[in-house]
Every structure is written in structure tokens, then in C-alpha cells.
Image (cartoon, helix red, strand yellow):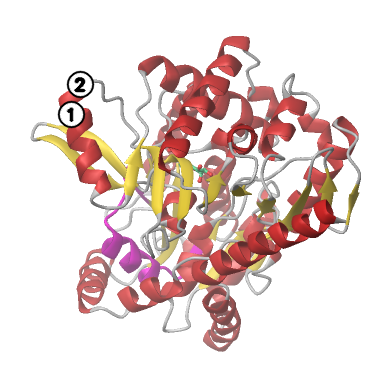
Amino acid sequence: MSRTIIVSNRLPTKVQRTGQGLTFQPSEGGLATGLGSIYRADDNVWVGWPGMFVDDPNEQQQVTERLQADSMAPVFLTESEIHDYYEGFSNGTLWPTFHYFSEYALYEQAHWEAYVAANKKFCRAVLELAGPDDTIWVHDYQLLLLPEMIRRERPKATIGFFLHIPFPSYELVRVLPWGAKLLEGMLGADLIGFHTFGYQRHFISAVSHMLGYPNQSGQIDTPSRPVLIDAFPMGIDYQHYAETANSEAVAQHVLAYREALREGRIILSIDRLDYTKGIAQRLRAFEGLLERYPEWRGQVSLLMVVVPSRDQVAQYQSLKEEIDELVGRLNAQYSTISWTPIHYFYRSFPFEELVALYRLADIALVTPVRDGMNLVAKEYIACRNDERGVLILSERAGAAQELSDALLINPTDTNHLVDALNEALLMPEEEQATRMSHLRALVKQYDVFAWTKLFMDRLAYSKIKQHIYTTD
Ligand code: G6P
């Protein structure tokens, strides 16, 4: 029987070491939470890193057995791979470059070499598992070289690739000393998917400028094979969020939170700690609201969840300090005995509590300066069975291409953001309901299952097209 082998740097389960030994928790981030619902179907298996350095052979065995029972196959990274491939090239070079923060990007030959070696390691893990009829679906910027590495060993394999972050303008790609090699790596796939048409266009333009391969109607003709390029905006497991939002457990949490927060209105902000998410800008906008519209003081609080992420990378450490300082200063300046302007949590929340926060929030404030898609926006919508609440969304998140009934803002324009906050707080319930019902219909229809089906159907079509091409 043929199955799908999903490959990504991070598995949907992460291992952590506690006083009680090794524990297994759900991973953070859009890729892991988004795909978490689909990989268990059929006989699929997910290959990836369990998120922690494990070198003791007995512990590796324990982790492997535990993950295998849940259809995962771990790839263990050494300490130097974590440093040079994961924190170095993936998150110190590619992540900032692809999000238009090229001033943060490092260009280290040693990091590049570690990236090549780590992609080879993932390649070996895939080849060990994949049968000739299996479909291999590679995900994200940590594994850009992998499609071509697999292709070299298995010329006939069916390989899909999906990028979960933006693909930037050619002008940024050309700055990377290894840009052409990265493009060749991706072109090992039969189908390359992006969240938006804009990212797709940037990729085609980079390939045409840097490799000179011709393209027509979403197809690039490499010297050996045609490769299809398309946009597939990722969805979420809508039903899972909507059902959980209706559950008794969530109702209990909402009640408890409501009691603690009394009558106050809630603006919700949830992200991984990342400079692309615009967290500091958001805090400044909240300050602007309290300054420009003082009538909201004492009436509205910002509930801000920041999930720890990549804390060994320098920019993430300094961002954490900046946020801590801003929150401290704003709370010290505006708090009263009965009102706390910002409730700040530096941790992740269990699923049902997270859904309760979505249910509680009058406003979801999703204002990244760059974001491939942003699934938090879609999760908020899926939880609003009551058709209340306002989504304020950055026009620079991929999700803005679809969610046009949100209040769309430019995250750098603090004044605009302050006005959007005021407008959202004043929005009549009928308008909230109209916007929310449109948004919900969209998120429901294009859920993660529809997304997977579209991608897989197109991948199967790419093979048919190639067959015609080679027998022409
Ligand atoms: C983004 C990336 C994912 C990544 C996630 C969490 O969503 O697209 O590939 O897994 O962030 O980041 P981390 O570095 O913790 O895996």
C-alpha cells in the first residue's frame, strides 16, 4: 500500500527533560499544529527532529519507541547540528532573509556546510523508510535541499514540497551566497507549494533570474523535468476548534477567567516569541490607545501570550528583554488597584485553555510585520461559534489574502493600529456577526483537510503531466 511520508525539521511532538525523566508535549508553531491533524490518516508517517538533544542510546531508544507508536520517526540532531544547522543556517540565515530582516542574517560557511549535512541526514532517514510507491512530502525552509537529494537517489519518486514561510523577492534571495543551490534543491520536487500567489511569483522570478529556467502558467522547465508551482493557502482543523469551543470544559475555563477579569474587555495576542510577529509594535499601539482614547483606561486589558521560541538565537534573547521592559513600563505607568492593563504570559497554554482565551477575547490582535500565513487568526475565527469578536489582522500576513472581512492594518503604522483598536472596541454586534460569519464560512470550507487534498491531487497531476512530457 502506498503512504505519505511527511518530513519536516520539527515533529508535532517535542521531548523535554524534567525531574521525572523524559516527557512528551505538543510542539508549537503553525506547521506542527496545522499538520498535526492529518498525518495519522492511513499508514502515514512523519519524519523529524523531536526538539531536544538526546545522545544517550537508551534514551534514543525510549524516544523512538514512544514516537513510533504515534506514527513518527525521530531524526536525532547532535549539539553541533542544533547550533550550526538549526540555530545557525535555518534560523540565523534563512528565517531572517525570507522575512525581510536581512540585516539580521548571518553568512557563515560552517553553518551552510552543517545545513547540507543535516539535509543529507534527513535524506538517509527518508530513504530508509520510503517504499517505491510512497509519496514524500517535504516541509519548510530547514529542508530546502532535501527534494533534490532524494531525487538523486530515487529519480522516479513522487516528491512534494511546501514552504510555510514567505518566499521573498528575488532581490533578497540573490544576497544569499548559496541562493542558486537552494533553488535547485527545491526544484527536486514534482510540485512546490506556497501559501500565496505572491510568494509563488517571487519564486518563479528568482528561478528565472538565477537559474535561467523558462516558465509558463505555473510550470518551470528544468533541464531534466517540469516542476509545477502553485499557491495553497493552508487551513486549520476547523471542526476540532469549533467542537472544543462548544465543550463543557471550555465553558468552565471561560467562566473562571471571566470571574477573574470581571467586566473588562479583552484584547488577545498570541504568538511564538519572534521579531517577525510585531509584538513590540503591538504593545506600543496598546499604549497609544490608552493615551489617545483615555476613556478605555480601566475598561480594556491586553492579554498577551508569548510562547518561548529559539531562545539560543541572539535576536530572540534581546527581543524578550525588550518585551519584558515594555510590559513592565506600561503596567507600572497605567495600573490601578483594580485594573491591570497587560496580562503577560511567557509560556504556552494547554489546548482547552487556549480555546477558552479565544472564546473570551473581544478582539484578536494579529499584527506580524511578516508572516507566511498565520494560523492564530484562523483559530480565533473557528472558536467564535457565537459570531462575536473582531479580528485585527496585518496585511503582511499570508492570511490577509483570504480574510478580507477582518480589520486589515499596516503593522508599522501605529496610528492606524490605534484607530483600528478603537473601531473594534466600538463595533456594533451586528457588524461583528456579519464579518465573523463570512470569515467562519471561509475557514470552515478551506480547512486543513481540503488543503491537503488540493495539494495531493495536484501532486498526482504533476506526475501525469511529466509522463506526457517525457513520452512526447
Ligand atoms: C514556523 C516555521 C516552522 C517551525 C515553527 C516553530 O511556523 O514555519 O517550520 O517549526 O515556526 O519554530 P521552531 O524553530 O521551534 O521549530
Query: Residues at badges 1 and 2 in contact (C-beta under 8 Å)?
Result: yes
Q: Is mark 2 within 8 Å of ligand 1?
A: no
Residue 131, position as x, y percentages in the image: 46, 47
Q: Residue at x 78, y 45 (%)?
A: 225
At 51% from the left and 46% from the top, the residue drawn is: 283
User: Count the marks: how many?
Assistant: 2
Inspect the image, locate mark 2, and give the three-letter code of the amino acid beneath it: Asp
Q: Nearer the viewer, residue 282 or 137?
A: 137
Q: Determine if residue 424 is in view.
A: yes
Dividing the picture into quarters, in which one does residue 230 lie?
Answer: bottom right
Which residue sits at x=78%, y=53%? 198
Q: Quadrant of residue 62?
A: top left
The residue furthest front is 471
35 displayed left or right of 64: right
Callout 2 secondary element:
loop
Question: Is residue 212 left or right of 163 when viewed as pictured?
Answer: right
Position of residue 295 measured from the top left corner of the image (x, y, whole percent): 50, 65
- In front: 31, or 58? 58
Bin the neighbour count of mark 1 within 10 Å (Cα to Cα): few under 14, some 14-19, many 20 and up: few
State the quadrant of the N terminus. bottom left
Camera-side residue: 316 or 263? 316
Which residue position holds label 2? 56
Residue assigned mark 1: 59
In whole angstroms, how far apart are the C-alphas of marks 1 and 2? 5 Å
Q: Which residues are magenta?
A: 343-364
